[in-house]
Image (spheres, rainbow, N blue to C red):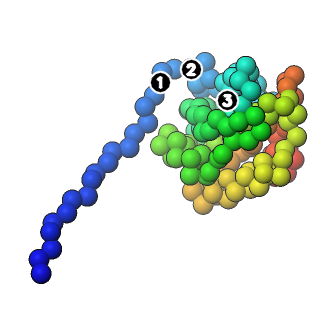
Amino acid sequence: MTSKPYTIGSYRVSVVRDGATPYEDATVSTPREIAGLLRRYIPTDDPREHFVLAALNVRHRVIGLHTVSIGCLTSSIVHPREVFRPAILMGAAAVVVAHNHPSGDPEPSAEDLSLTRRLASAGTLLGIQVLDHVILGGEERFVSLKERGVV
C-alpha cells in the first residue's frame, strides 16, 4: 500500500498598522489616565459593550489599541486567546484591558471579576503582565479592578 503525499499550508502572521493615532505613545500610569484614554477610544454613542486592549511597552507607553470584542447591551464575549493574540503580535510587555457598561453603572459583575482573574493568569503564563481592567460607566465614572485588588 502506497501513501499519497500531502501538503501542509504555510502561513505568515503579521500586524497591520492603521496609522498613527492620538493615543500612540501615551503613558498610562494611573487608572484615571487609563479611563481617560480608553473613554476617547470606545464609542460613546454605541449602546453595546466594547472590550478593548491597550498594548504597552516596558515603559508602559501605549504601542497599540485593539478592539477585542463588541457585544450586546449587557455582555461581550471575550476569550484570553483573543486578548493576547494582538498583544503578542505587537510585542507588548504589558496590557491594560477595559470595557464599557452601557447602563452607565461601572460596578463589575461576577463575570467581569472571573474574566479578569483568568486574563491575569494567562498573562502570567505568557509573560505579559495585565496591569489593570478598567470598567467605564457614564459621567466619567469608572472602576479599576487593580484598585479593588482583583489584578
Residue under label 3: 27
Mark 2 vs 3, N-terminal side: 2
The residue labelled by disc 1 is 18
Mark 2 in CB contact with mark 1 (< 8 angstroms): yes
CA gap between label 1 and label 3 equals: 20 Å
Residue 104: percent from left, percent from top: 85, 29
The earlier-in-sequence mark between 1 and 3 is: 1
Dot in front, 2 or 3: 2
Whole-percent x, y for residue 133 in the image: 75, 42
Residue at the disc numbered 2: 21
- For image coordinates 43% across by 31% down, the residue present is 16
Disc 3 marks a residue whose amino acid type is Thr
- Left or right: where does residue 98 sit relative to residue 62? right
Query: Please, what secondary structure does the residue beneath circle 1 have?
Result: loop
x, y (%) of residue 112? 78, 48
When asked about the image quadrant of residue 29, the answer is: top right
Look at 15% across and 74% down and name the residue there. Answer: 3
Q: Residues within 10 Å of mark 2 (few under 14, many from 20)?
A: few
Which residue type does callout 1 highlight?
Asp
Q: Which mark is residue 36?
A: none
Task: Identify which residue, 10 or 15, lies in the foreground.
Answer: 10
Q: Is residue 45 left or right of residue 60?
A: right
User: For residue 97, what is the image quadrant?
Assistant: top right
Residue extending farthest bottom: 1
Question: Residue 9, position in %: x, y?
Answer: 27, 53
Query: Is the residue marked by circle 1 packed among few (<14), some (14-19), or many (20+) residues within 10 Å?
Result: few
Say few, some or many: other residues with alpha carbon within 10 Å of mark 3 (under 14 / 14 to 19 / 20 or more). some
